Image (spheres, rainbow, N blue to C red):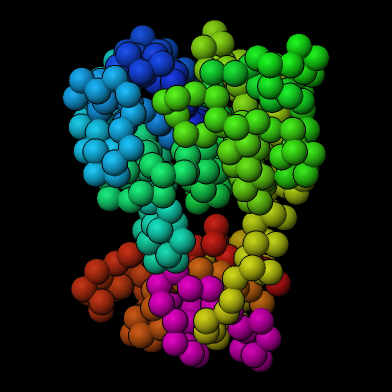
Amino acid sequence: MSRALAGARRIVVKVGSSLVTNEGRGVDAEAIGNWCRQLAALAAEGREVVMVSSGAIAEGMKRLGWSTRPKELHELQAAAAVGQMGLAQMYESKLREHGMGSAQVLLTHADLADRERYLNARSTLLTLLQHRVLPVINENDTVVNDEIKFGDNDTLGALVANLIEADALVILTDQKGLYSADPRRDPNAQFIAEAVAGTPELEQMAGGAGSSLGRGGMITKILAAKRAAGSGANTVIAWGREPDVLLRLAAGEAIGTALLASLPKLTARKQWMVDHLQLRGAVSVDAGAVLKLQGEGKSLLPIGVMEVQGEFHRGDVIAVRDPEGRELARGLSNYSSAEARLIARKPSAEIGRVLGYAAEPELIHRDNLVLR
């Protein structure tokens, strides 16, 4: 049995270009249908699943009649724009066959680097999951060039795992998993069934890109696993055409290479919140809010806020202080300091009336709050 997906409730699945487009011969309806069937089955079990799918550029190349990948940025972006139509259409039709809704979400790395856009993207994805809609995510290649030039969707998959606090990241590729050397060139290459994500030796043994269509090699998958482990998510690298690979992994079967996070999810997130984010301000809360936060593990609502200190924006990290001024928690604020001052001491139902909109009912959601 593998520990990688044992008990995983929220799973991000990333699939590579060569698998989605059958090595560039256009969107592979059978393969996508097979993954969608498995994703729907996992959702029926009560799991939350997100798909990060490559293939837009390769599908666009096919639709435009291009046999080789262009080098000009504007042509790559045009291919992505054309290909995204076909890719989204295929996922939508195949998921609908299994009674599941779907949504196309195009992200850039900048969306996840900016705190406000980070929260917006997170809220959107979690709302989709709550409504049993499966997000199909891709890099927005039509407006950015990082992925097209030298990036990959493996990194995007890891960033999404961090974003939604996934329990596991599954990277489906055209290889069985990770080897000590390139098995296509070295007959003595040893298969690695399990390792700790972030181990330096893993990066040393990884090779370069293995496909002319995709841009990511095994090194990008190892680095993605390291990034996913930063928020406590385990990663599995497996062959995408293994029969029922997702269902078998979720059942605990050992398939592919498992790269395990060294810290449990809550510990990893606490370390990230406490050590790596700079405080931008603070709020003082009343005794009732202290009880809710410390005793019941609740979110911080505006009604419990007595005072707002400093100037901060939506998505900034702020301290939460008790009536005596002691810091009891810190977390990502759903509102700016100016907005927080307006809604302080008011029930969440009045946020929309006071501000003209309501981003969230909480000032800080419990998932984005760490007790000190």
The picture places residue 370, in percent across and down from the top left corner, at 63, 66
**Nearer to the camera, 167 or 284:** 167
Residue at (66, 77) in percent of width and height: 328
Residue at (19, 24) in percent of width and height: 64
Residue at (41, 16) in percent of width and height: 23
Q: Quadrant of the C terminus?
A: bottom right
- Magenta extent: 300-327
Q: Quadrant of residue 33?
A: top left
Residue 366 left/right relative to 73: right
Residue 230 left/right relative to 150: right
The picture places residue 8, in percent across and down from the top left corner, at 62, 33
Residue 102 left/right relative to 151: left
Can residue 313 be found in the magenta stretch? Answer: yes
The picture places residue 65, in percent across and down from the top left corner, at 20, 20
Total marks placed: 0
Looking at the image, residue 154 lies above or below residue 95: below
The picture places residue 275, in percent across and down from the top left corner, at 68, 69
**Nearer to the camera, 299 or 13:** 13
Looking at the image, residue 40 lies above or below residue 57: above
Q: Quadrant of residue 269?
A: bottom right
Residue at (33, 64) in percent of width and height: 359
Looking at the image, residue 281 lies above or below residue 59: below
Residue 244 left/right relative to 71: right
Looking at the image, residue 366 lies above or below residue 259: below
**Nearer to the camera, 34 or 363:** 34
Q: Is residue 291 visible?
A: no
Can residue 86 be found in the magenta stretch? Answer: no
Q: Is residue 162 visible?
A: yes
Q: Quadrant of the N terminus?
A: top right
